[in-house]
Amino acid sequence: MVDELVLLLHALLMRHRALSIENSQLMEQLRLLVCERATLLRQVRPPSCPVPFPETFDGESSRLPEFIVQTASYMLVNENRFCNDAMKVAFLISLLTGEAEEWVVPYIEMDSPILGDYRAFLDEMKQCFGWDDDEDDEDEDEDDY
């Protein structure tokens, strides 16, 4: 009986050793695959965006239409990143500098509901920085004469 147990123990030790060696080999293969994957990922470049990243806006009224077109175009081609109004407003805010940045601070400090409403935020920007939609309509009417 003791001899049988010794033989069984010896067989278990041999199996354990073989499994340990196999485990080490598999771990080495895994390490190599992870390194290869990292190398391949560095070689893959994401597709370039057809719309360039928008420029910042400092509050200069004449640049507001351009800023709105740039940001709207960028958000349109990257719609998966801008899935709701709060994300869109946060993106606009991230591009504000100077006077425009100072203008938005009170809205942020009071956690204004406008921060979650893209259209309302744009309307506020237009009102503050001098873009009057009615003026645009009048100019078009004058051109018709």
Image (spheres, rainbow, N blue to C red):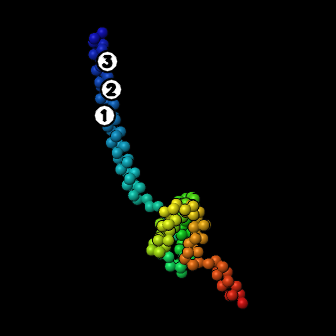
- Residue occupying the point 39% across, 58% down: 42
Looking at numbered disc 3 in the image, what kind of residue is underneath it? Leu
Percent position of residue 36, x then y:
37, 51
- Residue occupying the point 58% across, 75% down: 127
Looking at numbered disc 2 in the image, what kind of residue is underneath it? Arg
- Residue occupying the point 27% across, 16% down: 6
Q: Crowding at label 3, few (<14), some or many (≥20) Cα neighbours within 10 Å?
A: few
Percent position of residue 116, x then y:
57, 61
User: Where, quadrant-wise, is the C terminus in this rendering?
Assistant: bottom right
Percent position of residue 31, x then y:
34, 45
What residue sits right under mark 3 in the picture?
Answer: 8
Element type at mark 2: helix
Percent position of residue 87, x then y:
53, 60
Q: Say whether disc 1 or disc 3 marks the residue closer to the N-terminus.
A: 3
The residue sitting at the top extreme is 1
**Position of 40 compared to 57: left or right?**
left
